[in-house]
Image (tube, grey):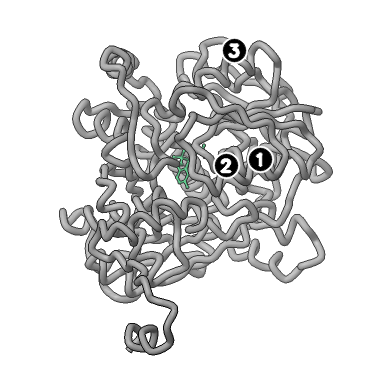
Amino acid sequence: MNKTDAAYQKCINPDCAAEFDCSSAIGGFKCPRCGELLDIWYNWDKIHVPDKLSDFAKRWANKKGPLDFSGVWRFRELLNFCPDKYKVTIGEGQTILQQNDAVAEYVDMQRGCLYLQYEGLNPSGSFKDNGMAAAFSHAKMVGAKSCICASTGNTSASMALYAHSCGLKSTVFIGSGRIAFGKLSQSMDYGAKTIQIRGDFDDCMRQVQNVCTKLGLYLLNSLNPFRLEGQKTIMYRILEGLGWDVPDWIVVPGGNLGNSSAFGKAFLELKQLNLIEQIPRMAVINATGADTLTDLVNNKKLRWNNGKVNQAVIDDYYADLTALNFSPHTCASAIEISRPVNLKKCLRAIDICDGVVRAVTDEQICDAKAIVGKFGLGCEPASAASIAGLKHLRAEGIIGPDERVACVLTGHALKDPNVTVNYHKQKQGQFSNPPTEAPNDLDEIIKIIS
Ligand code: F0G
């Protein structure tokens, strides 16, 4: 590795800690020496990082500079792994942080304390675009021609969009019948080769890693550490939305655990750079039908332990899942995952952020989603897990009513209209708002309205 580089890749296993430069795309992004996950590290003394976070805000004014306009690359000094000429942007990260008192009331928080970060406003409708902008920049830097991912839907939609924008061929693996139609329609529309594998997301994830190694394709799942660098910027924008103050809590849904991992890393780096004084706490929210993280952390007491994670606990847990032929099930299909690839990085983030983990039921998710739809800009089911999780943590008294909380709403409401329509039509929940049948008759229609 070239020690003079501003950035390099490093294995997260402290007993290995192998380093590689950023100009290589390591097959499948697993450490070639020990098979563990890789991180991006920076030689901060070689990077001109602004003295204070508010300096980044000035870039908003430059609407003519695509990198300044991007909600990812505006913060480029904090993810400085490639020269500007490779940086890819299609306008990602123009997302907002909205204070929402009606949702605050629903979760039993005081007015003015709850903020929603709407990542559904990204070009492909989910937070994935933050990561894709970064990862495709790396793909361009290493000259990749063809890329691939396994997905519960949003990764594939986002990857397909960036791939055609950058001129790469793209292939997506999705579990047959496991993907919301909005997302499936996107990857087909954006020109990806879409392969429906008879299995769930975890099966797809296993196959995509095999295919990557065999065919040397560029992998765009969150195993790709460059993707996670892009996802750090969601946290920078939350700070920006709060006038560069740090909230007390970040609440985020947990699936493959890329976001939570990226958020923990973002805050650790900001603290090390003296750009923030304190690190917020983090709550990661699973669905009860896909609650591996919750079970491992809360029941099996699995911890980061300075990088020496007890692998035997994970192996035993996964062996049990296999023996039971377990397949996760939740209406929040985006987080229907039982073997999250970023588990260890997420444990690290929980350690950094003094985090907690909870699981919420599909019913709680759907009710929370209806509330966000009624009083906010709307979101998809997985995103609403964060609101349902916050309600849970409020009821437990873990989060106080007057603490400042930012919930990350990861995907757009229109990603999964089926769940929404079923909830309202079948009068499943507390907030169902079913349509009324009317005869084609003016008097009868007026009667129904009044
Ligand atoms: N919310 C949405 C809308 C998602 O699409 C995902 C993940 C998550 C939350 C969970 O995020 O993996 O960082 O913990 N979707 C992936 C996909 C797995 O393939 O689209 P995570």
Q: Secondary structure at mark 2?
A: helix
Give the CA distance from mark 1 to mark 3. 33 Å
Q: Is residue 391 left or right of residue 50?
A: left
Q: Name the residue at the left extreme.
A: 396
- Which amino acid, mark 1? Met
Name the residue carrying label 1.
188
Quick one: label 3 or label 2, which is nearer the N terminus?
3
Q: Residues within 10 Å of mark 1 (few under 14, many from 20)?
A: some
Name the residue carrying label 2.
184
Q: Please provide percent x and percent y for residue 214.
A: 66, 11
Q: Quadrant of the N terminus?
A: top right
Give the CA distance from mark 2 to mark 1. 6 Å
Quadrant of res 359 = top left
Give the CA distance from mark 3 to mark 2. 33 Å
Residue under the point 29% across and 64% down: 432
Q: Please provide percent x and percent y for residue 112.
A: 35, 75
Q: Is residue 98 left or right of residue 21?
A: left
Q: Is residue 279 visible?
A: no
Name the residue carrying label 3.
32
Circles 2 and 1: CB distance less than 8 Å?
Answer: yes
Residue under the point 60% across and 38% down: 156
- Which amino acid, mark 3? Pro
Q: Is residue 358 above or below residue 307?
A: below
Q: Secondary structure at mark 3?
A: loop
Q: Please provide percent x and percent y for residue 107.
A: 25, 64
- Which amino acid, mark 2? Leu
